[in-house]
Amino acid sequence: MFKKIYAFFAIASVAMVTISCFPDGAEYIDELDIVYTNYDASFDFKSKSTFAVPDKVIKVDEENVPGEPGFEPDYVSPAYSAAILASIRSNMRELGYTEVSKDSNPDLIILPAVFQTDQLYFYYDWWYWSWFYPGWGPGWGWYYPGYYPPQVTRIRTGSVIMQMTDPKGQNASDQIPVVWTGIVNGLLEGNVDTISGRIGTTINQAFDQSPYLAK
């Protein structure tokens, strides 16, 4: 049986923070954007030089649930995924990293996903990435060395999560370490014409508030 690793996201504080910041309600949707980051403080980012990202952004929702081996998830609209991936790539390059293909033994792999659910509890299963992650096999999963999985409360529909993994750090239990996590809450909500700009602003903020990533 395949071992599954779940990253759970509870519901409460982000909603409460949003309410406290805007007691009369936010006037514009971008006022609700919240950026969360966390990382493994013991990980030596400066020793890494290459990264890879997929060419698609997966969509996580109640109907898009991993099942049998070979499962391939639904994907976010190319208009949105192009903006998300472009922002990740430009930030990583500015930090001093070089992009390579997933088959070129990258030091870091960044996996972006968009949540299209507003349920109280849901999981983000590693199996969503079995179609992409190089060398993936039975029993593999994720773990978060040195920090807890994201404890962001109330992920709104359209939230974006970025997980930076260390593919060379696989442990004896076939688990891959997630060394950095970035979440932008409710990014793909509001007027379609404003979304690309908000993607750039908020993903940039996630990297800006993570200076330890710089080489």
Image (tube, helix red, strand yellow):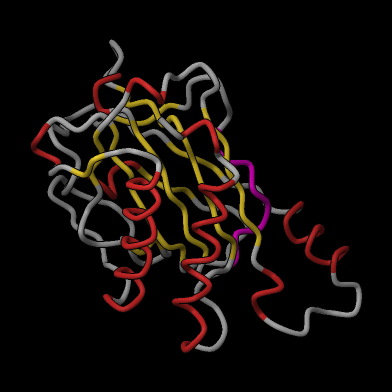
Residue at 60% across, 66% down: 156
From the top left corner, tell me how far across and down residue 180 is, in percent: 47, 35
Task: Give left or right: position of 16 versus 207.
Answer: right
User: Residues in magenta?
Assistant: 149-156
Q: Establish if 71 lies above or below 52.
A: below
Tell me which secondary structure the magenta stretch mostly adopts: loop
Image quarter of the C terminus: top left
Residue at 55% across, 58% down: 184
Residue 151: within the magenta? yes
From the top left corner, tell me how far across and down residue 15 is, in percent: 75, 61
From the top left corner, tell me how far across and down residue 58 is, in percent: 31, 60
Image quarter of the N terminus: top left
Q: Nearer the viewer, residue 147 or 206?
A: 206
Q: Establish if 33 lies above or below 11.
A: below
Residue at 40% across, 51% down: 91
From the top left corner, tell me how far across and down residue 93 is, in percent: 32, 47
Q: Nearer the viewer, residue 159 or 164?
A: 164
Q: Nearer the viewer, residue 127 or 104?
A: 104
Task: Give left or right: position of 76 versus 18.
Answer: left
Residue 185: within the magenta? no
Task: Give left or right: position of 183 versus 60.
Answer: right
Residue at 85% across, 72% down: 22
